Amino acid sequence: MRKWITLFCLGLVAALLAAPSLAQDATPEAEAIELEPWTCPEGFEGQTLNVYNWTTYVAEDTISNFIALCGLAGVQYDTFASNEDLLAAISQGNPGYDIIVPTDYMVAIMIEQDLLDTLNKENIPNMKNISPRFLGGSHDPEDNYSIPYQWGTIGIGYNVEKVGKEITSWQDVFEYQGSVAWLEDQRTMIGIALKQLGYDPNSENPDEIAQAGDFLIANGGNVVTIAQDDGQALLERGDIDMTVEYSGDIFQLIYECECDTYAYVILSDGGTIWTDNLAIPVDAPNKALAEVFMDYILDPQVGADISNYTAYGTPNQLSLDAGLIDEELLNDPTIYPTGETLENLFSIKSVSDDAQVAYNDAWDAIKILIG
């Protein structure tokens, strides 16, 4: 999907797993915090920012407000469906993007392949707002190449009325006698299979990876499609009864529906937890404006508006401390999981080139026979 967002009125403004909780850091004196509205540095009037992001991943006014505040000519906003699609688009030479949004493990891969530019942190003073829990991760230990954007989980979204029972485990998903969609995310899907088989979900053993691929093929009889980050739309249209999906995508459907038709669950026997990050690819046409955009996103109100709209977790500590996150979201354990739920989740990590080839081969075989 390609969008061209243009300002017509310049006056328009409007580690993780070790933590017992990812939501309860807000100070009880939240209402006492006074916040100044974000202001754009001078000198960017008439310029254009080029963004490559996931779908349904900003608030309705995130981009238009940024255009207004900086007096931009516009923002070119393209979307991708998977980290692998993002890597493919950038690895042959940056086609013209200033901002990209890779998941944590993909940040590590892109750093290793010299695809990301280093950040001038002096241009991003709002980095001070990031919770320490989201800094210094193994994907970018010095935070030189990326800043956390949103975080969440991958679990199951389903139509409660059609499914007719509570879904609690992957066995429930595999044995369901109805239409199911898997997610176009090879590392998550194969990682889940590896975990089901008792292996490391980030295994680099080619035999184990092949076994995981065979496991998914053997348990994919109810899969009608491998969704390109649009499982929630398929669910809403009634094309499927159940989908492997990103948490926020399902919650957006639930809140838009204002009904009890849909549910999201983190399964008792595992799923993934991830952090998406803003990064600047090498040869970005407008690196300076990209860093300004990063600072804008880290404004506590801007960041909170995004998290409140997308129903993903915020890494912005000041958004939490200032009480800007909707309490309904903050208190939902499937959005901000705690305790045992966290312990059952795993993060995707970058693997060796040989192991990645094995994952690619297994996923290709799965898609030929299932997708």
Image (cartoon, grey):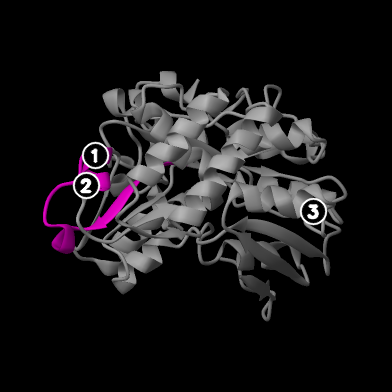
Q: Residue at x 39, y 67 (%)?
A: 233
- Read off the residue under disc 2: 175
What separation in Å lies between label 2 and label 1 (alpha carbons)? 6 Å
Quadrant assignment for the N terminus: bottom right
- Mark 3 or mark 1: whose residue is earlier in sequence: 1
Q: Evaluate if marks 3 and 1 touch, with contact meaning CB atoms under 8 Å apart.
A: no
Q: Position of residue 78 (x, y in %)?
A: 66, 64
Q: Residues within 10 Å of mark 3 (few under 14, many from 20)?
A: many
Residues drawn in magenta: 152-174
Q: Compute the Cα span from label 2 to label 3.
A: 50 Å
Residue closer to the observer: 43 or 145:
145
Amino acid at circle 1: Gln
Instruction: Indicate the position of residue 358 as horizontal and vertical percent values.
Output: 60, 34
At numbered mark 1, what does the secondary structure look like: helix, strand or loop? helix
- Residue 245 vertical placement versus 277 (above, below): below
Q: Residues within 10 Å of mark 2 (few under 14, many from 20)?
A: few
Q: Are the two marked residues, 2 and 1, in contact with CB atoms closer than 8 angstroms? A: yes
- The mark that comes first in sequence, 2 or 3, is 2
Which residue in the protein does label 1 denote?
A: 171
Q: Which residue is mark 3?
A: 289
Pick the front one: 84 or 190: 190
Q: Amino acid at mark 2?
A: Glu
Residue at 35% across, 49% down: 220
Q: Which of the 4 quarters of the picture holds residue 126?
A: top right
On the image, which quarter does residue 344 sit in?
A: top left
Residue 74 vs 201, above or below: the answer is: below
Q: Residue furthest bottom?
A: 8
Q: On the rendered structure, is 71 left or right of 262? A: right
Residue 331 in the magenta stretch? The answer is: no
Give the residue at x 63% y 22%. Answer: 136
